[in-house]
Image: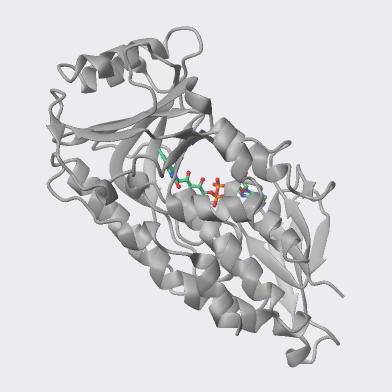
Amino acid sequence: MALRAVVVGGGIGGVAAAVALARAGIDVEVHEQARQLTEVGAGVSLAPNGLRILDRLGVGDGIRRLGSRYAASQLRLPDGQVVRHEPYQFAMAGQNVGIHRADLLALLAAELPPGTVRTGHRCTGFRQDDASDGASDKGSATVSFADGTTATADVVIGADGIHSVLQGFVVAPAEPVFSGVVAYRGLVPRLAEYPDGAIRMWMGEGRHFLIFPVRAGELLNYVGFVQTDTAVRESWSASGDPAALAAHFAGWDPLIGRVIAAISGPGGSGFQWGMYDRVPLPRWSDGRLTLLGDAAHPMLPHLGQGVNQALEDAVALATLLAASPGADGVPRALTAYEELRRDRTARVQLGSRRQGAGWDSSGSQLVDRRWIYDYDVWAEAVALTR
Ligand code: FAD
């Protein structure tokens, strides 16, 4: 009989995991708290390590259609002066892709067997028993939801984001860590004066500004990162004030001013996002429960890896579970998953903190990303199954 998996959380991580699990022959359900699958109105940058996986999950053509492959990648000082850097110290022209988050989620969701996603299901509890504790003939794990319903499976995957409820069933509850940075982010329509296909980052003391194209170049994604003394909510519903953003970047390259001016125009959008992460967790799994994506390793976005690492998790987990000899092998497969993923994601979490500080000091420390981009998680996971 096929293994049964329940994924809690229908963000990019949870849906990607469900696609990978279904392709590996595992029966999977996704339970999402929202009334429908939705994503933030913003872009995400896909790196070679993530794009490799998206090809494997069957959405490579969609990414090529809806994404924007970067034709040029530039670092600049506030006045627009170009900063020389190696390609692997930022996004790689020709190899990294910007995409609207909603487009990526929709592409992945379209790969799921019909009926996989159950919306309006907010997870509130978890319990498990195992044959080894004598409590039942066969181990299973059960998730309960706010509406009183439950879902039982051989394995439960907590893909429920940085405020994960399921994380509290693996490690002692702890608050996310505020980085002291707020991001003003959103989308504006393509600007005639912004070069096609370019990703650009301007770096100054205590702030930096990023622009890249999404939706086949029709939209520009922008993020203005600004240091702040007050803790800001980590929420995409808090609207970002374009006047405050303009004041933070007054006197910088006029191109930034034009992007900020477009936020209030037709098709422009903006919101504020407090930047939080966590220190690497000491463990991700307990018995038949494991964590994935931001639930396991929330990171600052300064290496552009949150989604890319969630995609790696998805493929690693599906590969190791598929090789498991039936339901009894699930806890061992989860241990192998965690051992494969924990050190690498911890390095990316800590590297993201370091790179954030580097951007805010005019790029004095640029992280070499080759070890991130060159990694093939599928090959690593398959090697463990032999
Ligand atoms: P989430 O997207 O948080 O999804 C969690 C899902 O679980 C949500 O749908 C939520 O509704 C649901 N949920 C939560 N609790 C429950 C519950 N109790 N029951 C049921 N459902 C629940 N990453 C990149 O790779 N590249 C980038 O360029 C990049 N840029 C970024 C820029 C910024 C400013 C920020 C803030 C982040 C950026 N990231 C980037 C990181 C990336 O956004 C996250 O790492 C990624 O979205 C995490 O996906 P996830 O599915 O694990 O979690």
Q: Quick check: 170 above or below 211?
A: below
Is residue 39 in view? no
* Residue 95 horizontal/vertical position (percent): 41, 44
State the residue at coordinates (45%, 39%).
97
Image quadrant holding the C terminus, namely bottom right
Q: Up-down: is 270 above or below 382? A: above
Judged left or right of residue 316, residue 106 is right
Q: Quadrant of residue 196?
A: top left
Residue drawn at 51 percent across, 12 percent down = 267
- Using the image as rendered, state which of residue 65 and residue 325 is in the foreground: 65
Residue found 75% across the figure and 50% down from its top: 146
Instruction: Choose top left, top right, bottom left or bottom right for residue 28.
Output: bottom right
Closer to us: 246 or 81? 81
Q: Which residue reaches farthest top?
A: 265
- Tally the marks: 0
Q: Position of residue 367 (x, y in %)?
A: 23, 54
Determine the image quadrant of residue 317: bottom right
Horizontal side of 7 relative to 199 (left or right) equals right
In this picture, is 293 found above or below 170? above
Instruction: Say left or right for 367 vs 67.
Output: left
Residue 201 in the figure: left or right of residue 286: left
Work out whether residue 363 or residue 271 is closer to the camera in this orientation and state it.
363
Measured as percent of width and height from the top left, residue 81 is found at: 12, 27
Question: Considering the image in quadrants, where does the N terminus appear?
Answer: bottom right
